[in-house]
Amino acid sequence: MATSHKAVRLALPLGPRTLIVVGCGRGGTSLVAGAAIILGVPMGSSPASIIHEDMELVYAAQGRDIDGRLIDGSADNGLKKLEEIIEARNDANDLWGWKDPSADLYLGAIAEVVRNPFIVFVNRDMAAVAQSEVKQMQSSIEQAYDLALIRYSRYWELLQRLQWPTLLVSYERSLLNPESLLCEIADFIGLEPPSERQRDFIKQFASGRDYQELDLANAAV
């Protein structure tokens, strides 16, 4: 069963590159970020994280400090801090990435400093996204569905404009066949096919369904 397909493939995955996992909140991005970590991609998350986000980067994008406190200053200052973090990650890694369901709010503004980007755009049944949002945020189902529709549409418009290599991923199909997800991400970003241990790891990780920690020490083999 195919998990996903390439929407745009403009460049071969050679040389330094950046993997960016995007989609709706509660839309399956944590599963995909976990798969990237299992493949050995530094995603900036702490070992105790259950959402597998680079909180320094995500907080900077929100105009917050590393502790999550709002920083006084202009939006330009926030973007400057975000660009500095990205440039530091570029200097430290040939391949690295991050996951942020809210990246549609800033990707266009930082496009010049994102080095050879490869996007994984995670899609989930919008009714499921909305129902999960209602449970987490106590919003109405109508509000949650509207927000999911707006975010998916905004991402698609942005990615069509940026024309970055993009892999479309189905969250539901990924749960049914997590090995295929792992193999397709590896192929998309130019990594070797996953080892048997990595395949076993993603099956175990995906079987939990809920947010969970990932043992980074044993993930990349």
Image: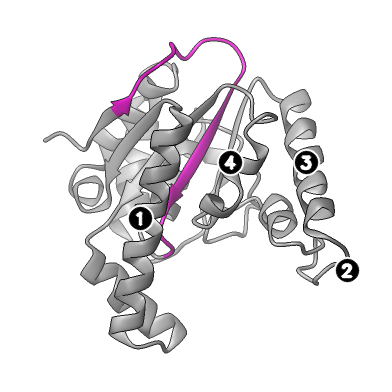
Q: Amino acid at mark 3?
A: Ile
The residue pinned by badge 3 equals 85
| Left or right placement of residue 12 versus residue 66 in this view | left
Image quarter of residue 128 = bottom left
Relative depth, front residue between 46 and 85: 85
Q: Let me know if residue 156 appears in the view.
A: yes
The Cα atoms of the two marked residues, 1 and 2, are separated by 30 Å
The residue pinned by badge 1 equals 152
Marks 4, 3: nearer the viewer: 4
Relative depth, front residue between 210 and 132: 132
The Cα atoms of the two marked residues, 1 and 4, are separated by 15 Å
Q: Amino acid at mark 4?
A: Gly
Pointer 1 with pointer 3, Cβ within 8 A: no
Q: Position of residue 44 (x, y in %)?
A: 66, 44
The residue pinned by badge 4 equals 108
Q: Amino acid at mark 1?
A: Tyr
Q: Residues within 10 Å of mark 1 (few under 14, many from 20)?
A: many
| Left or right placement of residue 166 versus residue 81 in this view | left
The residue pinned by badge 2 equals 72
Q: Earlier in the sequence, mark 3 or mark 2?
A: 2
Q: Earlier in the sequence, mark 1 or mark 3?
A: 3
Q: Amino acid at mark 2?
A: Asp
Marks 3, 2: nearer the viewer: 2
Pointer 3 with pointer 2, Cβ within 8 A: no
- Residue at image position (49%, 56%) is 101
Marks 1, 3: nearer the viewer: 1
State which region is magenta: 7-25
